[in-house]
Image: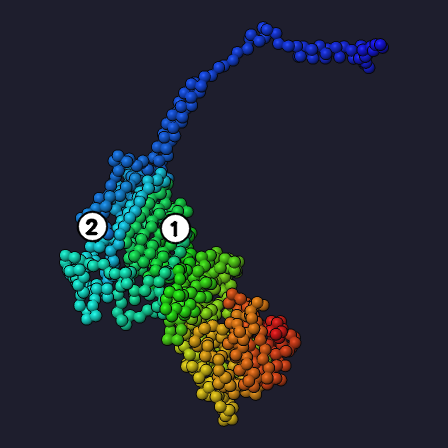
Amino acid sequence: MAKTKPKKSKTTNGANGVARNGSSNAAHAKKKSPPTKKMVDNRFSIRLTILFLLLSFAISTVIAFFIGWLARLVLLSHMGLTPYDPANPPTRTSMTAINDAGATDGETVESMAMVLVPPSGMSKKRQDNDDEGGNSGTGKKQPIQLPSPKVIAGKDVPFTTYASKTFQMAGVATSNTLHIDRSTALLLGRSRKEFDGGPDFQSEDGESEEDDGGTKGDAGDGWVPCDEKACSRGKEKKADDDAPVNDYSHNDDSDGLHLPAGQHLLVDIKDVDSNFLNSEERLAHAMIELINESKLTLLSYHCHSLVPVGVSCAGVLLESHVAFHTWPMEGVITMDLFTCGGGLLIPTLPSIEKLFGVPSAPSEGEDPEDVPKPTLLWSHKLRGFREGFAPGYVRSKNPLDGSLGRHVLGKLDFDLKRPLLSTKTAIQSVNIYEVMEPKSRDINAYYESLASPTGTPTEDSYEATNPESFGPNKILFLDDVVQSTSYGDAAYHESIVHPSMMAHSNPQRVAILGGGEGAALREVLKHKSVAEVVVLEIDEELVSICAEYMPQWSDCSDIEGSGVASCFEDERARVVYGDAFQWFIDTFGKVDKENEEEKFDVIIMDALDPYTSVEIAGGLYNGTSFVDSLFNGLSEDGVFVVQLGKSKMSTDPPDEVGRFKDTALMIEALDESGFESIHTYAEGHSGFYMPWSYLVAFKEYGTKANWQRPAPQMQIELYKRLQKTKSGKPILKYFDAETMMRYQLP
């Protein structure tokens, strides 16, 4: 068998290389040498028993708990709170309350509370306010006495049962519950003064009814509860001639019909005084005063002061509930008020702003003008079900249940929303609101535009010198239909007036049907050729309302040739108050050559939308007699224009079977009356939340040639035929020749 010799390691560096390898191998051998017995004996080990581990864990837990308890005491003392002692709870015995089980005067209500001391971080003014509220010299706040709800004179309130459960939580500083004080109502009932008990306690002949041996005026029995059918849910008695301003009979439950429906008002306020927001007593007083001013009935309420700051309150109303929560450090309060009674909630907004929008006091050395004023945001919604439960209820008849409710009242994201007017004339309901949407206007720029310009261009901001570009949108609603907006004023009125005026070669006599706000009249008076404008308006009150709340709509002061503050005062304008449609039928119902001079070159109908169910609009388009009178009332080359309302969508069915059936009937009537050309066009910037449609009818086909003018010729005609402004500003804000090109397309 062959033997193999072991290989020798090769070195390439001579003796030095061998020496280095040898030294390295020796160190490696020393590192790898196994431990000796002496080295093992020098090591040590720790053996822990299970008992030792358990005792260590228990002791450390006790120490940690004790340290945490001390830290909690220090923290609570720093925040101004003393822990609640279950063995000796502080009580509030001076509070008067009449509970629903029949408690009488002199009985007391005890309430759990924590003693509150002013936190060290609070301002001196806050501590002074607390001292005025009953603090002692010790620096600790004495138990507060919150006001009790009371029965408003003139209201009948049925007795109710009450049940509650209060949980003691670590984050709650105080807890107070108060019930309605019926002492006033009992005294009124026993003395029979100022209040007759309401219809629930009257027989047909007006005498008091006996009920189980007791009567309304029996001093021993006091009030008797009303039954389920007759209970008026605390609605205030009104005289027969005290009719509501608006027709909201669908919200009224005085007839005993309690609908499964109600109104919900949501309110958010910021930049409110922090001391007010952290005062349970002041907030409770504000809540009770709000309920009294709103003619509601507060049965009971429950409030908690929170740790470290903040207050939460919830009140049970006979009509439903009210609740709010505060963030004092942020200066914010949020509130919701829900009622199922007949009273409207929107009129309570001024009271809410007055009672809860308390402005912050300026700090030392701070300019009061720099302190932000409270900002109120709100939303109003109709809740529940009315259709199918209220006999004869029609949704379109309710101003709160249509466009006004959807587009304005129901939105909470407006930076500004102010109700300027809500009333009802002899003809229709009128609502005017100012709103500002964050996506279209900046609220800070609006506030800056309110500053009075100094006249120095270098010092005045652009907003201050051009305030008309930064103001809120003013919206006019007639019977819940958007009639006009300040943002869409120019686009809407210029697009309905000037295309038809330019289609006529020389318009001298013009009739406007509707247009009580005066904006259509303003646009017509911009034409030099106009000699007379007859405005036919059925609602005289509306003209006065618009002149007061929307004067810019009828302002002709900047138009050369007019120069009057109100366009209705122009010598060329004549206003006829009455039924415009009957006026046309009476005047031009029959062909009469004797009234040729009274005929109009252009007739503009700015009335309500034909597709709505409003009775006025329904009668305009369903017959041919009125349309025949329009045809007879025009000159040979006359032009008629009318707004049709919302533009049709691609998914809409034919007009004859869809929601635009009245439009189809009118087009058919115009054709049968003799109009030789009918054209429709749309404008998408009228401020009505979607594109708006118009219809123009030419009595003679040749007149349509003026409608089809090319853009350069149209621009020249506009320049020649329109008046100039005294200020030098353009006479038109929206309409021009290029816009007319769009209208030429069907």
Q: Position of residue 583 (x, y in %)?
A: 44, 85
* Three-letter amino acid code of the residue under disc 2: Ala
Left or right: 668 with respect to 332? Answer: right
Q: In this view, does 168 lie above or below 583?
A: above
The answer to whether residue 359 of the structure is visible from this angle is no
Q: What residue type is labelled 1?
A: Ile
Q: Mark 1 points at which residue?
A: 333
Which of 441 and 395 lies nearest the eye of the viewer?
395
Name the residue rendered at 56%, 83% in the picture.
Answer: 671
**Residue shown at 58% from the left, 82% from the top:** 698
Location of residue 157 (image quadrant): bottom left
Instruction: Look at mark 2 in the image and give the residue it sits on.
Output: 103
Residue situated in front as seen by the camera: 652 or 126: 652
Q: Which of pointers 1 and 2 lies earlier in the amino acid sequence? A: 2
Describe the colour scheme in one phrase.
rainbow
Quadrant, the N terminus = top right
Above or below: residue 99 compared with residue 698: above
Q: Which residue lies furthest to the top in this view?
A: 38
Return the residue found at the far right: 2
Residue at the image point whose x is 43% and y is 18% from the top: 52
